[in-house]
Image (spheres, grey):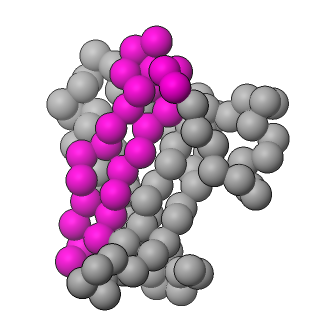
């Protein structure tokens, strides 16, 4: 499902808020998107209540993930280089970011 420009803007705004909340709670181990070369995959869908939701899959870029624009990047472990967050655009809410924690 494709996001419109306003939906993409809303998704990135909600993501920014979720990231700030995560980094405030985990100040000792923050996710620093611009320090590390993170990539984001956004997967949009309608949930069972017909609400538009977006899953953000974030990860530190590595040459082994050169396929990231075509295929979902999934790993086990990997520490904070890998995280996910669920957004509900209809309700303008988000879940707490979940990382693969420290490797």
Does residue 41 appear left or right of residue 30 in this picture?
right
Among the 4 quarters of the image, the one containing residue 102: top left
Up the image or down, 90 lies above or below 61; here it is: below
Q: Is residue 82 magenta?
A: yes
Q: Quadrant of the N terminus?
A: bottom right
Number of disc labels: 0
Residue 58 rendering spot, x and y as whole percentages = 52, 43
Q: Can you name the residue that lies furthest to the top here? A: 103
Q: Is residue 89 visible?
A: no
Up the image or down, 70 lies above or below 93; here it is: above
Up the image or down, 88 lies above or below 18; here it is: below
Q: Is residue 84 magenta?
A: yes
Up the image or down, 58 lies above or below 35; here it is: below
Instruction: Say which of 45 and 15 sits in front.
Output: 45
Q: Is residue 101 visible?
A: yes
Instruction: Say which of 31 and 41 sits in front.
Output: 41
- Which residue sits at x=41%, y=45%? 84
Residue 20 rendering spot, x and y as whole percentages = 28, 44
Residue 24 rendering spot, x and y as whole percentages = 21, 34
Instruction: Say which of 51 and 93 sits in front.
Output: 51
Residue 87 rendering spot, x and y as whole percentages = 33, 64
Does residue 32 appear left or right of residue 86 in this picture?
right
- Which residue sits at x=50%, y=33%? 82
Magenta part of the chain: 76-103
């Amino acid at each position: 499902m494709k996001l419109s420009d306003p939906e993409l803007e809303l998704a990135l705004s909600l993501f920014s808020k979720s990231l700030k909340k995560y980094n405030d709670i985990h100040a000792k181990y923050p996710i620093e998107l611009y320090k590390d070369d993170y990539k984001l995959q956004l997967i949009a869908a309608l949930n069972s209540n017909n609400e538009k939701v977006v899953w953000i899959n974030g990860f530190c870029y590595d040459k082994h993930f050169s396929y990231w624009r075509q295929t979902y990047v999934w790993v086990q472990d990997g520490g904070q280089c890998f995280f996910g967050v669920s957004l509900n655009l209809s309700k303008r809410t988000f879940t707490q970011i979940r990382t693969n924690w420290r490797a």
